[in-house]
Image (cartoon, rainbow, N blue to C red):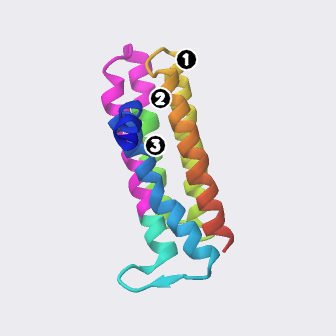
Amino acid sequence: MFLKSAMKRFSTASVLTFAGAVPFVFAAIFMYWDLERLPLIGDVQKVTDVYGLVIVVFIAGSFWGISVNLSEKKRSILLVISNGLTLLTFYSYFWLKNIPFQLVLIFLLVVLLLVDYWLYFLEVNTKEYVTLRLVVSIIVVGSLSIVFSS
């Protein structure tokens, strides 16, 4: 009964958003415990980097769907931001070797959050959505900080 009433309070999107943060939390726990390699998973830091790359590109790609609700100028700005962040993510992952990728992911996730706040001020996103993004971003950035520092 409790689980059923709790699930009614949370939308599918919020549950999935928090679920997307779970791999980052597990990676932080594993790295904190010095479990850098796991059977069947391999290098925890590398898996976290790839997962982070996928998440950043997924969020940036979602801006394409959101852009249909914007004026032409704002739509163009959002699409350039989306493509720019996607290209920066891939460039950083494959070719940028002097900055740890976890720091790049932290920067990109903060930028994506700021874009979501911009969309909130344009009245495209809801207060509940940006609050959800803020909470999950804090969890993910904190987890990535632990992965980086381990």
Which tag is nearer the camera, tag 1 or tag 3?
A: 1
Give the residue drawn at x 34%, y 17%. 69
Q: Can the viewer see residue 94?
A: no
Q: Residue 4 in magenta?
A: no
Magenta highlight: main SS: helix
Q: Give how far across and how far down residue 12 sits, in percent.
A: 33, 37
Residue 4: horizontal and vertical position, in percent? 34, 39
Per the rendering, the mark at residue 121 is 1
In the image, residue 23 above or below residue 72: below
* Residue located beneath label 2 in the image: 129
| Dot 2 alpha-carbon crowd within 10 angstroms: few under 14, some 14 to 19, many 20 or more | some
Q: Of all residues shown, which one is farthest toward the right?
A: 149
When asked about the image quadrant of residue 35, the answer is: bottom right
Do the CB atoms of the residues marked 2 and 3 lie less than 8 Å apart?
no
> Is residue 134 shown left or right of residue 150?
left
Amino acid marked by disc 3: Gly
In the image, what residue type sits under mark 1? Answer: Phe
Reading the image, the residue beneath label 3 is 84
Please state the extent of the stretch shown in magenta in the rendering.
51-78
Residue 60 part of the magenta segment: yes
